[in-house]
């Protein structure tokens, strides 16, 4: 569906056959293409990758939190007790959380994709089982194998099967 929308805007979409068709593989391919074609534009919807892209995506996604705050204040006349969001690449979560970071009474909760569990290596629980590393140009938590290389994450949710997490989530 996203490719169709991008094409409706008359943009060229270059599909990749690289890897296992995950967000990690798409980012790897996009960064590789950008390095080889410096006249191209590198854009990403997830809050990952080299600086300044996580900041840019966080800014664009901040409308989520602004609208959520406005709506709950209009409907309930108060702030929420809790915010919940799933984390993978982090764009939706930081978009929601950012507007509430200074609100001391709002508890912020994040959920990550547990997959089939850490013991069999099929998880996307980066904050629970990852370690700090540089991955795709960002220093953040990442699921790493015994050689300290990023490993494939597992989740049935396409946006959660990412072996890293936005640097804004863990800071």
Image (cartoon, rainbow, N blue to C red):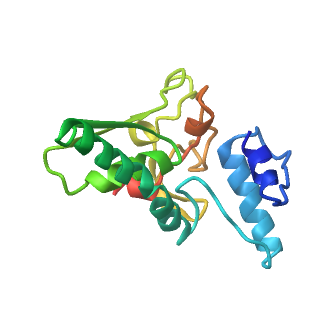
Q: Is residue 157 visible?
A: yes
Q: Is residue 90 visible?
A: no
Q: Is residue 136 above or below residue 26?
A: below
**Residue drawn at (47%, 46%), measured in percent from left and top?**
92
Q: Is residue 65 left or right of residue 39?
A: left
Q: Is residue 110 left or right of residue 87?
A: left
Count numbered badges in the picture: 0
**Rendered location of residue 72, percent (x, y):** 27, 40
Q: Is residue 55 left or right of residue 146?
A: left
- Residue at the extreme left of the image, as rendered: 105
**Residue drawn at (76%, 39%), measured in percent from left and top?**
21
Dividing the picture into quadrants, the one containing residue 48 is bottom right
Dividing the picture into quadrants, the one containing residue 167 is bottom left
Q: Is residue 43 left or right of residue 167?
A: right
Q: Is residue 145 above or below residue 58?
A: above
Camera-nearest residue between 163 and 5: 5
Q: Is residue 29 above or below residue 144?
A: below
**Rendered location of residue 93, percent (x, y):** 42, 45
**Residue drawn at (85%, 50%), measured in percent from left and top?**
15
Q: In the rendered view of the protein, which quadrant contains the N terminus? A: top right
**Residue drawn at (85%, 59%), measured in percent from left and top?**
12
**Rendered location of residue 90, percent (x, y):** 48, 48
**Rendered location of residue 124, percent (x, y):** 52, 34
- Residue at the extreme bottom of the image, as rendered: 39
């Amino acid at each position: 569906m996203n490719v169709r929308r991008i094409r409706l805007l008359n943009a060229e979409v270059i599909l990749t056959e690289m890897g296992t068709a995950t967000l990690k593989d798409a980012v790897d391919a996009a960064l590789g293409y950008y390095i080889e074609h410096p006249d191209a534009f590198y854009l990403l919807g997830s809050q990952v990758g080299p600086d300044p892209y996580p900041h840019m995506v966080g800014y664009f996604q901040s409308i989520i939190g602004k609208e959520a705050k406005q709506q709950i204040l209009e409907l309930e006349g108060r702030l929420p007790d809790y915010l919940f969001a799933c984390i993978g690449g982090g764009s939706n979560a930081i978009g929601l959380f950012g507007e509430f970071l200074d609100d001391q009474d709002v508890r912020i909760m994040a959920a990550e994709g547990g997959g089939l569990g850490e013991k069999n290596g099929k998880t996307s629980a980066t904050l629970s089982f990852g370690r700090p590393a540089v991955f795709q140009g960002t220093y953040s938590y990442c699921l790493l194998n015994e050689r300290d290389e990023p490993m494939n994450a597992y989740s049935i949710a396409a946006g959660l099967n990412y072996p890293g997490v936005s640097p804004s989530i863990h800071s």
